[in-house]
Structures are given as C-alpha cells and as structure tokens.
Amino acid sequence: MRERFIIFLIGLLGFNSLVKAQQAYFIDGYHGGVYGHYPMGQTSFIVQKLKQYPDWRVNLEIEPESWEVVRQRDPEGYSAFKQMFKDQSVRSGRIEYVNPTYAQSYFFGTSGESVIRQFQYGMRLLRKHFPEAVFTTYSAEEPCFTSCLPMVLKSLGFSYASTKNPNTMWGGYVSAYGGELVNWVGPDGTKLVTVPRYGCEDLQPGSTWQSIAWFNSRDYIGKCLDAGIKHPVGMCIQDAAWSHGWNKGPWLGQDTAAYYCPTAYKTWRDYIQNCSNGSTGDDWHFSQEDVLCSLMWGTQVMQRLAREIRTAENTIVQAEKMASYAKLYRGEKWPMDSIDEAWRTLMLSQHHDCWIVPYNRLNGGKTWAETVTDWTRNTNQKSQRVIDQSLKLMAGQRRGNKIRVFNTLAVEREEPVSVEVPSSWKGKDWIAVDNRGGESPTQWIDEGEVTKLLFRAKVPSTGFATYTFQESTSRAKATFCFERMHDGRCRLESDLYSLVLNPSKGGAVESLKVRFLQDRELVDWGNGRSFNELRGFFIEKNSFLSSTEQPATIRLMEQGPLLMKVCVQGKIGVHPFVQTIQLAQGEPRIDMHIKIDWMGDVQIGEPGIEFKTEDPRKSFYDDRYKLLLYFPTEIESPLIYKDAPFDVCKSRLENTFFNRWDSIKHNVIVHWVDKVAGDNSCGLTLFSDHTTSYVHGEDFPLALNVQYAGKGLWGMDYRIDRPTEFSYSILPHQGNWEQCRLWTRSEERNEPLIATLAGDISLTSASFLSVENDAYELSSMYYEGKSLYVRLFNSLSNDTSRKIAITGTNLSVKLVELDGRTIETLLVHEENGKSYLDLAIPQFGIRTLKIDSNEK
C-alpha cells in the first residue's frame, strides 16, 4: 500500500510539472476613445510601457476619430506610436488593431448596412493615420457581435475573430461553445476561424461583468487544459484610462505568483497563426440567439434613442438612393460631404456607450442620450437636404398637377402614398391618373397645417412613376365601414379585415378576422390577456394594472376610399393613453401607435429586488413584470422567427423568461418578430419602430415591451420623465416568414414611397434596376468617385441565379468585396437599352456590384 502511495505521489508531481510546463497566452490591449475614455497622455503612456516591457503586446479597440485629437494634443506620443505601429508582421509586430469600427457598435440592434459602414468608414479613417495597418482579427471588449459578422469580416479582408469579452460583460456575452478554435459559420455559410468563449469558460462567480478568462488564473488555465485546450488564452482589453487607475501597463502585472506561468502576451493574429492549432474541423453554426445581451429595454431613454437611430438609419439609406437617381438621370454631383457627415453622426449614435450608459456624461457635457439626439438630428437634416435636392432635380419646380413617386427598393410596389399639395386644392375631389390613363381615388389627410392627398401608386423597382391629379366630377365612395353596434362595441371593416374593438375593455381588439384566410379568427378568446391590451406591474400599487380594467372611448379619425383610422382613449390606472389603429385599402399591414401620458413618477417592473451590483438577480431582467402590449393569437404549434442584421433567426427558446445576469436569453426584436403555425397555415408578425425586447412562452402570448421604470445597470434610476410614445404594426399572413416575404414587407415600412409635385414632364416612369422575381433586396446604392455601388441581399432560401436588369448600355459590372477587391468581372449582355447579367446569392448573403460606364 505504501509503495502504491509513493508511486501515486510521484505521478501526481510529474503531472503537476507537466501542467506547469504548458504554455498559456494572454490578449492584452486598450479599449476606448475620445468619446468613451481616452485621456490625454494615453498614447505616450502606451509607448512608454511598450518600451518598458519588450515582451508585451497590445491589441487596440480605439475610436478612429481619437487619433486626430492625439496628433494635435500629444504630437510626440503620436509620432512614437506611429513608428511602433509600422511593424504589422505577425511574429514581431507588437500592435494589432482588432476593432477598427467607427464607433464600436453593438451591431445586434442596428441594420446590416450600418454594420458594414461602421467597418468601412472606421478602417478608411485609420489608414489615414496608419497607412501600414493590417486588419486580421476582429475582437471586442464589449459584446459587439452579431451573426452576420463572418460574411462581413471575410469580405473586408479579416481572417480571424474572437467572441470573448471576459471583463466587460455588463450588457451580456456570447454563448460558451467549443475549444481552442472553431469555424464560426454565419447564416450565409461563410466560415471564419474564431477563438470562442470556450465551453469551459464559465461566468466568474461573484461577478456580474466577467467570465473566468478575464485573468489567467491557475483555475482558468487548469479548466482549459482539462477540456483538451492545449494552448489556452485569456483576454482583457483594458479601459484606456491611464490617469484614472488603469495605469500598470501589462494587465497581469509583475507578480508572477498571482497568475498562471508561463503566460505569454500575444496579438490575436500571432496567437492564432503561430501558437494555436491554427485550424479546426469544428463548425459552429452560430445563431443570433447565441448573442446573449440584455440592455435596459423598455426604459424611456432606450426607447427614445433606439427610435432616433432607427429613423436616421432609414433616412440616410434613402438619401443615398435618391442622390444616385439624381446623378444617374440628371448628372448631379454626388453630395459626398453631406453623405459622409450624415453617416458619421449616425455611426457615433450607435456607439455601445449610448446604449449601455445613456445617462453618463460625454466628456463632462451632455449625456450620451442627449448627444444621440443631436447626432441623429444632424443625420436626418443632412439626409433630408439630400433627398429634397434630389427631388427638386428629378421633379422640377413644384407646380402644376403632376406627381412623381419614387421607389427606393428593388421590388415593384403598389401602395398608398401621400403628397403635399397647395392648400387651395382643399375642398375639391381629385383622382390620380397614371400615364396609361388608369385612375385611382384620392383621400385628404389631416396633418395639422400641411395639406396632403393620399392615393394608391404603382411604382417600378428602383425607379419612379408619374401621376396626374385631376378634379373628379364625383366623390369616391368610402370602402371602409365603421359601425357602433348596439352593445357599444365598434366594428371596423376593410377589404382585408374585420376588427371588433370593445370600449368596455379599454378598447382591446376582441376579434380580428382575416378575409384572405377564409375569415379566420386570429384572436385567442381563451387566453387570459386581451389583444392590444396594456398590462404591467406598478410597484406603488403592488399589483398588475391593465388597460382593460377601465372603459375607453373610441373615435373615428379618418374614413375614406383608401384609409381608415380610429382612436382609442383610455386609462391604465390613473394614466391616460391614446392608441390609434389604421387600416389601408389593399394593405395587409395594420399600423398602430401608442402614447401614454404619465401622471407623476411611476415605477414599473418586478418588485422586491434590492439592487446590488454583484447580485445577478435584478428587477429589470424579467420582462413579464414590465408594461407590455399583448397579442394573444389562435395559432397552433407556433414557431418564432425574428430578424437580425442580414439574418432571420428561428428561435430555439421555449420561452424568453429570465431574471438573472447569468441566465440571459436572446429576446431582442430589431424590426420584427413572427409567430407562425407549425403547418404554416397562418401567422402574425409584430413590427417595432425601435430595437427593444419581446416576450413569448408556451402559455404566454406574444408581447412587446412598452415600459420599465426603476433601478438599472450600476444602480442608475431609469425614470419616466415624459410621455411614452412609439409606433408598431401587425401583419396577419399565410405561410411562413419567407413565403410571405416578411423581409420585403419590413423594408417597405422602413423606406416608404416618396412623392412630390413635379413640374418637369420629360421623365414619366423608369426603373433603373430590377431583379428577376423581385428576389433580392436593395441594401444600398451609392457612388464612390465615378463608380456606382449596388449592394444586394438575398433573404430567400432559393439561391439559384437571377437575372438582373440595369438601365443603360456599355457598362462594366464587377463583383467586389466590401474592401474593394475585385472578385470577378461579370458577363453583361445588352438588349433594348438595358444591360443584363446573372447573379446567384446564397440565402442571407450579400453581393456588391461596382458599375462603371465604358463611355469616354
């Protein structure tokens, strides 16, 4: 027995020696910038520490605008840093720029086009300061991740990524998966070699912002080795704040007894290429639900900034497309300065600090949220000026009775559009006549002092159509029915729907029958919640309050041949609210709006949870207690789908419920979430005008987050200080999200038709670009120099080649990467003044066309 024990001890000592001999690695560096945190002297400090510690390596995540400030205020540090940065070789280079985005966006809450521009503008600016910069690995200290990144990064020239963010997980983290390396597989099938948050990389006990990889502790490295990770790596990209305590240089410090040895500092590209296995056969089919982030959804400040950012995102993309029309058809100079500045302030408004610390003051001045308002206002103003100038050029002076309608999507559209007309037209009946003599009724729209006429326009893909307003000899008949029934309920009838609103239950939708589904009833009468009901837990009342508990008044606001709008005025507790419901002729989407006027300070959310930073249990996590809009539907065996940047995610969740930081679930709605029957017989889509959270479970109806008020991250009091107001829509449909073209329906909501009076009759109708079967979405269209760039996105599973028609001849069309590299020159054939080419795009893939004229 004694001999066996001695042998065991010898073996154990030998094993320990072997473990100690295993090399470990660490990713260090700096995160921040002049908007976040980058004190003067930081650059000189980094240079000093790099000289002091020759074996140290730095991975950078610094806002690109910072370097111009550094150049002016710390010229010696700037020059010395530039000199050290020049060596971008894998082995000897000591500095790698791992997040070159313009403003370190979270990505998961914005559009796919915004993701691309964050990288393109950021990398362009960085190369002005560091011409030798090589962008190899993407990494971030915050959870700045989204599922489409492999496709975007590969096209920008990146080779690697990491999904770790071990020391700044306040807002969330990515799922733990795999070992040393994985192939991160994006929704389009693109693979990117990635260092994941290891499957063994647990969240740090006693922390609500870290995983165990934040420091190369012996415990962490031991777990990695036990999991078969032969070359384990930890990470902390430090806050760039040398004058505020983050001033020791190398993160692990000089006390080697405090961390696992041997540990070597590395750049990400050096670690992956020269230290790790280098490649893997482990394909990680990453879902958007692997992005586990929970911000202060439902708070007024988050709603406000998310709405402002969404509006600016939509406006700048439309401005680029309208400016492209003006250059294509009128030879107008490309408004580069205005477009670039509009994108600049939009990208800054997407900075992660805007979302996670909206109440913090930016450089001692306004809060992040207040600055978002300024930034997005600038984007909208610049964009609107571009649109107005383009309209003026494309339509001529606003006189006469011609109307030109512009479509900025790559699908033919037929839908209602309104146009501002002279006030002298009021009191007359008009019809809209297309260039073939087809007539459409019109309807006056009340928008305060602005006089507008609504009509239904048919506009070709990526183009425009011209209509003529003519006085009508007879008034168009109303095609909608609004009826107050004997029991007080109100019936709304359109060509597509029949709705019944019950004023005794706060104006809730008691019935929603869908005519194109054989009058199928969508409202689940057996559910405890009502359709379009407001309900949440009011802490001062210590109970749930519902809009159905008090009667409401229902008023008809608009009724005509094209549109009907009703107003519901009720109360939830003592707080008045107004909901509007709008039905349009031939339009399957039902548009709604909510405004709540709060009477005094209110707290809404889960009660009885004392805020403690280190306690993972917090009141703002459980959405079931927040004020919600409910949509109980009679849909069997439901499946949930939701959009993400260049992706649609099929939910794997049984429910969206969680109440702890260490058990976050993905419950984010960017543009829409869809609940569809398992047999695809029917479904209901919920659209939101801002990124927020949704709620759903087996016995819990689909619901939209309306309001949370109470303690939030870092104990900040997220208060109600103004009315809550936003728009949302529902879309009953047959088939799944793809069959009913939900991505296109969402884009129609984001980019409505644009109409203006036209004095120029030389242009009548045109389509610059069209895609066979309307198969692809037009993500963006813009000029760089003399080249027109057209980016297309395929949301559909049919990835067969499609024919694309482009107006014009003698064109050169190249397929290019996002960094400008040519993939191939496409074969173009001409016919009847158009150029045709074939293009195949995988589902959830993007392709960028560079179009040039060969004419001298």
Image (spheres, rainbow, N blue to C red):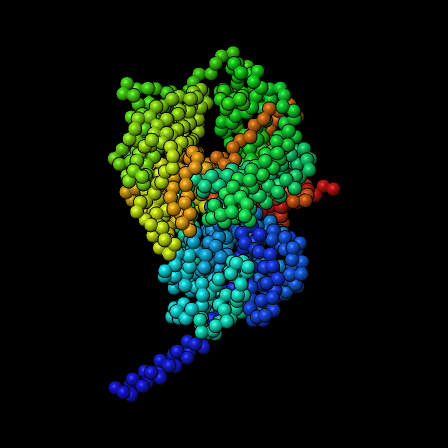
User: Residue 488: horizontal and vertical position, in percent?
Assistant: 29, 21
Residue at image point 36% right, 36% down:
629
State the residue in front, 506 or 530.
506
In the rendered image, which quarter is residue 298 located in? Answer: top left
Relative to residue 302, is residue 291 depicted above or below?
below
Q: Position of residue 480 (x, y in %)?
A: 40, 21
Where 215 falls versus 455 (above or below)? Answer: below
Of residue 356 and residue 698, the one placed in the foreground of this image is 356
Is 521 on the left-hand or right-hand side of 155? left
Question: Residue 145: horizontal and vertical position, in percent?
Answer: 47, 53
Residue at the image point whose x is 43% and y is 39% from the top: 300
- The residue drawn where x is 33% and y is 19% is 484
**Taking the image as drawn, is residue 600 in sight?**
yes
The answer to whether residue 86 shows anywhere in this view is no
Quarter of the figure with the N terminus = bottom left
109 lies above or below 271: above
Q: Position of residue 631 (x, y in %)?
A: 34, 36
Q: Residue at x 28, y 39 (%)?
A: 543
What residue occupies the far bottom of the structure in this picture?
3
Residue 263, compared with residue 458, is above or below; it is: below
- Furthest-right residue in this view: 856
Q: Taking 605 as reference, is 102 left or right?
A: right
The one of 317 and 357 positioned closer to us in this rendering: 357
- Residue closer to the observer: 162 or 832: 162
Which quadrant of the rendered structure holds the C terminus?
top right
- Numbered marks: total: 0
